[in-house]
């Protein structure tokens, strides 16, 4: 039996879910914007209170480690590290793109299992964070930042059915030349989508270092200064 606290903060949705033997016991979610700094800690505290009320305690903490929102990922991983360290339990780090892929798998139970899944997270303009997986989560293309054009994924549509999912997928819809595709739209990863992967990682002992693990941004974070600030500072 495994009780896992799942934390997902890679987008503007902040969510926490407690799972027991792969089933959701309790969950909380906020989708009103980037409120992670104020919402996440109370959500986790409430989850811990619910476990304590039942005389239970978590066996692991699972957290999405990216790609996604730089701020959200930092907040989520920092709290997950502190919780795992204080409780003396292992920390599980999950790829946001794999979380989306698993979410896609459960969206349609009539798929045959030989489809190709392409999760996409919007990275502004025509860039996305993406990868390509089969139903065994084998990476057919590794996670990477990609600038989309009409040649992107051109080698896929001559093979199996392709399923596109995530916040970056809609802006690619008019560029894709293949016909054998399905679009699941702007669907974001949530803590409840992590449960199957977290269970798999827990029982295989696939944990990350509590002290030294970092978010998987896929590319360096660059701060920008507005033109108005530059002009005002030069006066």
Image (cartoon, helix red, strand yellow):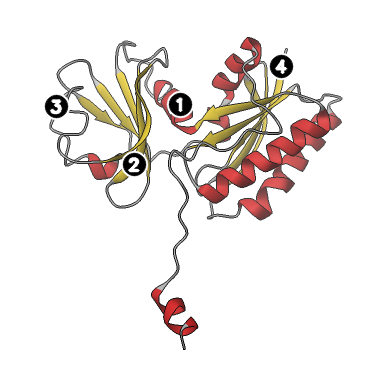
Camera-nearest label, 4 or 2:
2
The CA span between labels 4 and 3 is 43 Å
Percent across and percent down for residue 182 are: 25, 28
Q: Are marks 1 and 3 in contact (CB under 8 Å)?
A: no
Name the residue beneath numbered marker 2. 128
Crowding at dot 2, Cα within 10 Å, few <14 / some 14-19 / many 20+, comes out as many
Helix, strand or loop at label 4? It is loop
Name the residue beneath numbered marker 3. 179
Q: Earlier in the sequence, mark 3 or mark 2?
A: 2
Q: Nearer the viewer, residue 94 or 53?
A: 94
Answer left or right for 130 relative to 45.
left
Helix, strand or loop at label 2? It is strand
Identify the residue at the far front of this view.
Answer: 234
Q: Are marks 4 and 1 in contact (CB under 8 Å)?
A: no
Answer left or right for 75 relative to 34.
right
Q: Earlier in the sequence, mark 4 or mark 1?
A: 4
Question: Which residue sits at x=72%, y=46%?
Answer: 41
Name the residue beneath numbered marker 1. 98
Corner quadrant of residue 65 = top right
Q: Earlier in the sequence, mark 1 or mark 3?
A: 1
Question: Which residue sits at x=34%, y=11%?
Answer: 113
Helix, strand or loop at label 3? It is loop
Question: Which residue sits at x=49%, y=36%?
Answer: 189
Q: Is residue 75 visible?
A: yes
The CA span between labels 3 and 2 is 21 Å
The CA span between labels 4 and 2 is 34 Å
Q: Earlier in the sequence, mark 1 or mark 2?
A: 1
Name the residue beneath numbered marker 4. 2
Q: Earlier in the sequence, mark 4 or mark 2?
A: 4
Q: Up-down: is 85 above or below 38?
A: above
- Residue 57 - label: none
């Amino acid at each position: 039996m495994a009780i896992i606290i799942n934390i997902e903060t890679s987008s503007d949705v902040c969510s926490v879910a407690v799972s027991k033997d792969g089933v959701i016991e309790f969950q909380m979610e906020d989708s009103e914007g980037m409120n992670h700094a104020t919402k996440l800690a109370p959500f986790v505290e409430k989850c811990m209170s619910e476990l304590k009320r039942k005389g239970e305690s978590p066996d692991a903490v699972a957290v999405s480690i990216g790609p996604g929102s730089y701020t959200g990922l930092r907040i989520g991983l920092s709290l997950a590290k502190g919780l795992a360290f204080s409780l003396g339990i292992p920390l599980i780090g999950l790829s946001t793109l794999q979380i989306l892929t698993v979410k896609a798998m459960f969206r349609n139970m009539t798929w045959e299992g030989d489809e190709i899944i392409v999760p996409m997270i919007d990275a502004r303009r025509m860039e996305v964070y993406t990868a390509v997986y089969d139903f065994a989560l084998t990476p057919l293309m590794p996670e990477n930042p990609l600038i989309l054009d009409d040649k992107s994924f051109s080698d896929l549509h001559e093979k199996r059915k392709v399923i596109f999912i995530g916040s970056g997928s809609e802006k690619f819809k008019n560029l894709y030349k293949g016909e054998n595709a399905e679009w699941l739209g702007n669907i974001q990863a949530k803590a409840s989508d992590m449960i199957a992967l977290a269970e798999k990682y827990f029982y295989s002992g696939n944990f990350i270092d509590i002290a030294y693990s970092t978010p998987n941004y896929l590319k360096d974070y660059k701060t920008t200064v507005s033109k108005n600030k530059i002009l005002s500072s030069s006066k």
